[in-house]
């Protein structure tokens, strides 16, 4: 057995005759355990928040979305449709039209985005699950479904025939506007439902039938803004993406779910990184206790170290003893901290110990990568701290 490792393990297990040194050592180990556990719990909490946030966008985001490469719309030819229908990995797809509009009711108005959808839209996304009041729209009507924010701003009820609701969009063309009445296309609609997804979408979208949106924007029968795809379970997303791209050509750009929420993913990942760095800084401060503990141990074992040096043990080997002791202290403390934190996260998942609201438990997700992140962070910081402490041993210290 390696002599330095053997002595390091003995020093780690044995108590010092000096109670102050024992106390400092216990503080150092406790700091490592609490630091590792706290970092794991925080990372698991952010993983849970990330999943909780993204689950709302995934309700209305398709697996793949084809958008116009140039302009706001493109022409979907019969050949394109025939080619799409031959792709086995596609479970369903929906043609949509999107454009900015003004929605007005009872002298109140708001900017919004109308999204005209066809009858397959409910097969592509689970829109029914976010209808808070009322029902989903009928394709053969002037019905709309608005977000909770728009409904609140305009005081829109469901099936309230006493209020006129109008959608306005500027007419395409050039030259000065001579009359406000002729400058806009307009349609009268009736609100049949209110959806609730998140604050941004609630205050932005108005759903309508594809025919109504086409009429409002004066689109051609085969002119659309996007195609949204739902893939079959187990389908290869990238391979299917290539097949769809070949079917539609260069007139569209295909985006997956991550790309559709690129800014949200970046924000969540940035927040996760910032919190990790802050807790790593706290751990660095905690590892000063490890350095102090090792230095106190060196002073306490000065006579024993002098004996080892006199019988032929090199300064390098003596340094290795305390380097290994500090590394073992950090790694073992890190593992204990991770196990304790793992137990706490399991308890939170099962018994909802911490609540955000009376009915909503704080979301937490246990991910394998968080185990490795915490373990390697603790191990690397422990090795660095042990190296800093071990180099304090010099020949003048042990040869007295």
Image (spheres, rainbow, N blue to C red):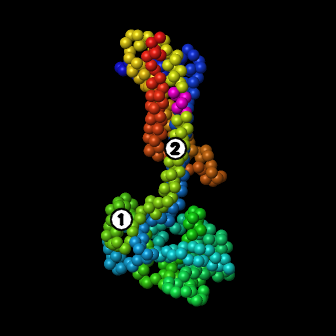
Secondary structure beneath label 2: helix
Image-quadrant location for residue 195: bottom right
Residue 8 visible: no
Q: Residue at x 55, y 34 (%)?
A: 285
The numbered mark, 1 or 2, whose residue comes first in the sequence reads: 1
Residue appearing at x 61%, y 44% in the figure: 353
> Compared with residue 12, is residue 67 higher up or lower down, i.e. above or below?
below
Q: Main secondary structure of the magenta part?
A: helix
Instruction: Based on the picture, tell me whether residue 215 belongs to the magenta stretch.
Output: no
Q: Which mark is residue 272?
A: none
* Tag 1 near tag 2, CB within 8 Å: no
The residue lying toward the viewer, choosing from 216 and 55, is 216
In this view, the residue in front, 202 or 137, is 202
Vertical comparison of 278 with 17: above or below: below
Which residue lies most toward the front here? 396
Q: Mark 1 Cα within 10 Å, few/some/many (few <14, many 20+)?
A: many
Find residue 74 and report its horizontal and vertical position in percent. Answer: 40, 77
Q: Which residue is mark 2?
A: 277
Q: Residue at x 37, y 74 (%)?
A: 251
Q: Position of residue 142 (x, y in %)?
A: 55, 81
Which label is found at residue 241?
1
The residue at the point 51 percent across, 44 percent down is: 276
Location of residue 289 with respect to 218 vertically, above or below: above
Q: CA distance from mark 1 to mark 2?
A: 36 Å
Residue 127, percent across and down?
52, 67
In the image, the segment drawn in magenta is 286-291
In-front residue for pair 365/327: 327
Q: In terms of depth relative to the viewer, which is nearer, 159 or 256?
A: 256
* Mark 2 surroundings: few (<14), some (14-19) or many (≥20) residues within 10 A: few
């Amino acid at each position: 057995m390696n002599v330095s490792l053997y002595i390091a393990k003995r020093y780690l297990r044995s108590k010092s005759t000096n109670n102050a040194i024992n106390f400092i050592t216990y503080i150092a180990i406790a700091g490592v355990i609490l630091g590792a556990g706290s970092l794991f719990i925080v990372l698991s909490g952010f993983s849970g928040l990330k999943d909780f946030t993204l689950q709302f966008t995934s309700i209305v985001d398709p697996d793949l979305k084809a958008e116009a490469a140039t302009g706001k719309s493109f022409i979907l030819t019969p050949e394109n449709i025939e080619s799409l229908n031959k792709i086995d990995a596609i479970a369903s797809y929906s043609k949509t039209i999107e454009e900015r509009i003004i929605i007005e009711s009872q002298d109140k108005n708001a900017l919004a985005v109308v999204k005209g959808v066809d009858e397959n839209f409910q097969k592509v996304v689970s829109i029914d699950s976010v209808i808070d009041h009322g029902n989903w729209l009928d394709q053969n009507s002037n019905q709309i479904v608005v977000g909770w924010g728009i409904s609140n701003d305009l005081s829109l009820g469901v099936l309230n025939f006493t209020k006129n609701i109008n959608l306005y969009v500027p007419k395409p063309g050039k030259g000065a506007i001579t009359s406000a009445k002729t400058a806009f296309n307009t349609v009268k609609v009736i609100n049949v439902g209110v959806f609730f997804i998140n604050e941004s979408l609630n205050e932005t979208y108005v759903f309508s039938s594809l025919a109504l949106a086409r009429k409002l924007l004066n689109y051609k029968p085969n002119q659309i803004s996007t195609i949204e795809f739902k893939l079959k379970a187990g389908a290869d997303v990238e391979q299917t993406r290539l097949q769809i791209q070949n079917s539609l050509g260069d007139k569209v750009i295909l985006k997956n779910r991550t790309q559709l929420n690129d800014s949200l993913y970046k924000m969540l990942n940035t927040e996760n990184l910032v919190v990790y760095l802050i807790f790593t800084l706290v751990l660095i401060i905690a590892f000063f206790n490890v350095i102090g503990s090792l230095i106190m141990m060196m002073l306490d074992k000065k006579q024993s170290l002098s004996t080892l040096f006199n019988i032929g043990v090199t300064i390098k080997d003596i340094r290795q003893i305390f380097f290994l002791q500090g590394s073992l202290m950090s790694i073992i403390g890190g593992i204990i901290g991770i196990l304790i934190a793992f137990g706490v996260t399991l308890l939170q998942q099962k018994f909802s110990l911490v609540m955000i609201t009376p009915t909503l438990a704080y979301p937490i997700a246990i991910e394998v990568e968080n185990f490795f992140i915490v373990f390697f962070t603790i191990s690397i910081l422990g090795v660095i701290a042990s190296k800093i402490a071990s180099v304090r041993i010099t020949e003048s210290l042990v040869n007295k």
